[in-house]
Image: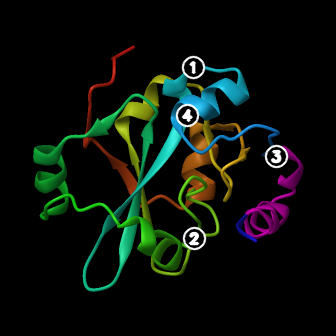
Amino acid sequence: MSLEKVKAYFAQYGMEDRVQVLHESSATVDLAAAALHTEGKRIAKSMSFYGDDDSAFLIIFAGDARVDNRKFKDTFHRKASMVKHDDVERLIGHPVGGVCPFAVNPGVDVYLDESLKRFQTVFPACGTGNSAIELTLPELETYSHAKGWVNVGKGWEEA
């Protein structure tokens, strides 16, 4: 159902044919990189965090980045608290392994981490653990309706 939702989302831009449905799992960075024949750092991984009340927001990181708790707190004025596995689909609109910044539930804000800026194109998921789309950074910004770029990652290599 999530894949169909994302394909319908991209259909309004005439891009549904760019969504790739893979024969292999792409539910983790390593699996996605292998299935897409690319480097893991080019996988645009979506991480879900609790917001106010019963809300959540997404930050899209490069595959080799992790959350820097100090930077996160300085940026969002709260402790980084990842959404529990059982809450992800309800709050975000996609299941774990397929979380992406497209066709998310109303009120889910999306931010893009600076770790992505090293690449011309990246591969976010498309709602399932075996789907992806290759997007340029301007396309990712546009189609994710990102609120902006943040610098809350660590552990990634500068280009």
Task: Say the numbered circle drawn on residue 39.
Answer: 1
- Residue type of the residue flagged with mark 3: Val
Q: Is residue 13 magenta?
A: yes
Tag 1, which secondary structure? loop
Figure check: 148 above or below 158: below
The part of the chain drawn in magenta is 3-18
- Residue type of the residue flagged with mark 4: Ile
Percent across and percent down for residue 4 are: 80, 67
Q: With 11 as the anchor, is 86 left or right in this view?
A: left
Looking at this view, is 71 or 63 the one in front?
63
**Crowdedness near tag 1: few (<14), some (14–19) or many (≥20) residues, C-alpha within 10 Å:** some
| Residue occupied by mark 2 | 104
Q: CA distance from mark 2 to mark 4?
A: 19 Å
Q: With 59 as the anchor, is 152 left or right in this view?
A: left
User: Along the polypeptide, which appears first: circle 2 or circle 4?
Assistant: 4
Tag 4, which secondary structure? strand
Figure check: 21 above or below 49: above
Quarter of the image with the N terminus in it? bottom right
| Residue occupied by mark 3 | 21
| Residue occupied by mark 4 | 43
Contact between marks 4 and 3 (CB within 8 A): the answer is no
Q: With 135 as the anchor, is 97 left or right in this view?
A: left
**Crowdedness near tag 4: few (<14), some (14–19) or many (≥20) residues, C-alpha within 10 Å:** many
Contact between marks 2 and 1 (CB within 8 A): the answer is no
Q: CA distance from mark 2 to mark 3?
A: 19 Å
User: Along the polypeptide, which appears first: circle 3 or circle 1?
Assistant: 3
Q: Name the mark nearer the viewer: 4 or 3.
A: 3
Q: Residue at x 85, y 63 (%)?
A: 11
Query: Is residue 135 something one can see in this rendering?
Result: yes
Percent across and percent down for residue 102 are: 62, 62
Tag 2, which secondary structure? loop
